[in-house]
Image (spheres, rainbow, N blue to C red):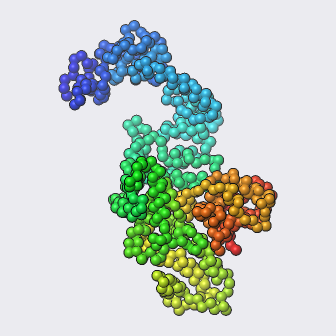
Amino acid sequence: MSPVSQELPSGWERRTDPSGRTYYVDHNTRRTQWEPPLSAMAAQRSTSLSLPSGATSPPTCVTPGAITQDHIGPLPEGWEVRQDPRGRMYYVDHNTRSTTWQRPSSDMLEARQVYMRQREHLSQAQQQHGQRSLFGNQSTSSEITHATGEEPGDGLGPLPKGWEKRVTPTGRPYFVYHPGRHTQWEDPRLQSQSIVARAQELPLPAGWEIRVDQFGRQYFVDHNTRSTTFTDPRIRMLQEQSADIPQYQRQFRNKVSVLRYSYCPKISGKFTMCVRREQVFEDSFRAIMAVKPDTTGFCNDLKRRLYLSFQGEDGLDYGGISREWFFLISHEMLNPMYCLFQYAASNNYQLEINPNSGVNPEHLDYFRFVGRVVGMAIYHEKFIDNGFTLPFYKRILGRELTLKDLETVDPDFYKNLLWILENEIDELYLGMTFAVDEQEFGQVKERELKAGGAEIDVTDANKQEYVELVAQWRLSRGILEQTEAFLQGFHELIPPEALVAFDERELELLLIGMAEFDVDEWRTHTLYRNYNKQSKQIVWFWEVVGGFDHEQRARLLQFVTGSCRLPVGGFADLQGSNGPQKFCIDKCGKPDSLPRSHTCFNRLDLPPYKSKEDLKTKLTMAIEETQGFGME
């Protein structure tokens, strides 16, 4: 330690940094500062004065012998500089009876006057609009009505530990939770479970950690973005809930919110890729598959901000180029001409894996690539151009397929199997065995559904087993390896547990999004059975649909047709089980029953409700709270 200069107060030392700048070391408190300390005489005189409180100052005028200038120059009128016992300088404003650590200047004083005027205006606006605002950091002690653990005297008992009741300048009480630095209007004693308590029951999102600073305050570290915050990320997730939206909508938004916060954090850096428009599929395949999973098993480079470009084109990617790339690449990789995917049926344009994709010896690498692209779309909140069948979404979710899933893929095949279950077949002798015929590159091959199945006849006694096996075969034929390759690539970005809260229809909405629907076009291309355009139920129906938001309209279309997407030709080109089939509304059911849907025929069974309110309630409940298909 170099000698302490004689002209400095006791325990102080003057030093110079490598850049030649002088700074001062206080060995008493082990602190450093750029400003020189006051003389020992000034420090001795200032020790008898009060410390900065941020709200008050003892004297109302500058006392004789007060220091009204520092090393920079004279202070504004009414200001004085003092030093606390630790050698730190602060400034006293005798005009407003306040103190501050910041040296006063004309700009600062003018800015403070502007701030005080704005604050006064904000207080008035707060009173009018009920805005939440906390000025407790500079409020006087009279604003704090009750401290932590004390009983406010309102008959509700003491506040829970860590809580404090305060009052805004407009007289509105609010509550402060000091451990989490959180405020709320609701009295924690009146809540069955406060938002803070509910948040503490949830696990932290992936990559987050709780720490405590030197003052004992709890804060949160986000290792994904290398940032810290005093706000509990779990509270932010819960605060997005809103009581004025439907339960299904709130649940879906909460699921998406948890997915974003917990499994899709923003990672620093960027992923750069340049592709040719005419070779977008091949260029993208090479660039994305060149990324290898790290020690965590994830392709974290693909999670960084996307910065994409097309060769020979100028433009900066602020989201628009990425959206266009997802549109183009999904259109190309899902093109049935590549033999990776095929349409589910001649009248169903949803895509499923092509069992004959093995014609390309590298098809499994391509399916892994498709899985990565789909995972990137979810991670970066983008959409793909076309959708898969609902059974394929269930495979992504890891859920078991059932006979009902076959109806959304091949309605005719489903009806044939259903007929077998509902009728006696022993006396008909249909000649069926536990074997099926498969076509592979023009050749018909027999495949047994179970060992020795070619020699086992289907009877009334075993037809249930037969139907289940043949349904599983139809839904899984020749696609197990491709599905595993797809899921391998998908899980390199999105872990399996990230989507456990979603069902297959919600996953479809998450992946392909919702389009805006023209209600007038919808009405124009709608058929009616046992109703007409002038029927009051039909008039009410379109008024209700006109009042729906985009998500509700998408769910209505999904409820009736099985998909939330429209074909290229819009409502005029809707497809049914027998070819083109327009949206149809049929008068069917009792006034106290819910509407039913027949996805094979794009038909909605709408009971003759007595009022518009009843129709809206029952229709909303049907599309938001129910599942299943009507049968015909």
Above or below residue 594? Residue 41 is above
Residue located 44% across and 12% down the image: 78
Q: Quadrant of the N terminus?
A: top left
- Indicate the position of residue 485 as horizontal and vertical percent values: 42, 69
Q: Is residue 557 visible?
A: yes
Residue 85, percent from left and from top: 35, 21
Instruction: Spot the residue most to the top.
Output: 64
Q: Determine which quarter of the picture holds residue 474.
A: bottom right
| Quarter of the view holding residue 535 | bottom right
Depth check, front residue: 143 or 430: 430
Q: Nearer the viewer, residue 110 or 369?
A: 369
Using the image as rendered, state which of residue 181 and residue 560 is in the foreground. Answer: 560
As displayed, is residue 353 above or below residue 313? below
Q: Is residue 625 visible?
A: no
Q: Position of residue 324 (x, y in %)?
A: 47, 55
Location of the C terminus (image quadrant): bottom right
Left/right placement of residue 521 relative to residue 486 reads: right
Residue shown at 25% from the left, 26% from the top: 21
Q: Nearer the viewer, residue 453 or 387?
A: 387
Residue at image x 22%, y 17%? 6
Q: Is residue 122 left or right of residue 214?
A: right
The relative height of residue 49 versus residue 515 in the rendered view (above or below) is above
Residue 227 in the image, given as x and y percentages of width and height: 40, 43
- Residue 384 lies, with reference to residue 114, above or below; the image says below
The residue at 57%/25% (across/down) is: 120
Q: Residue furthest front?
A: 312
Res 230 quadrant in image: top left
Total count of labels: 0
From the viewer's perspective, tell me whether residue 314 is left or right of residue 144.
left
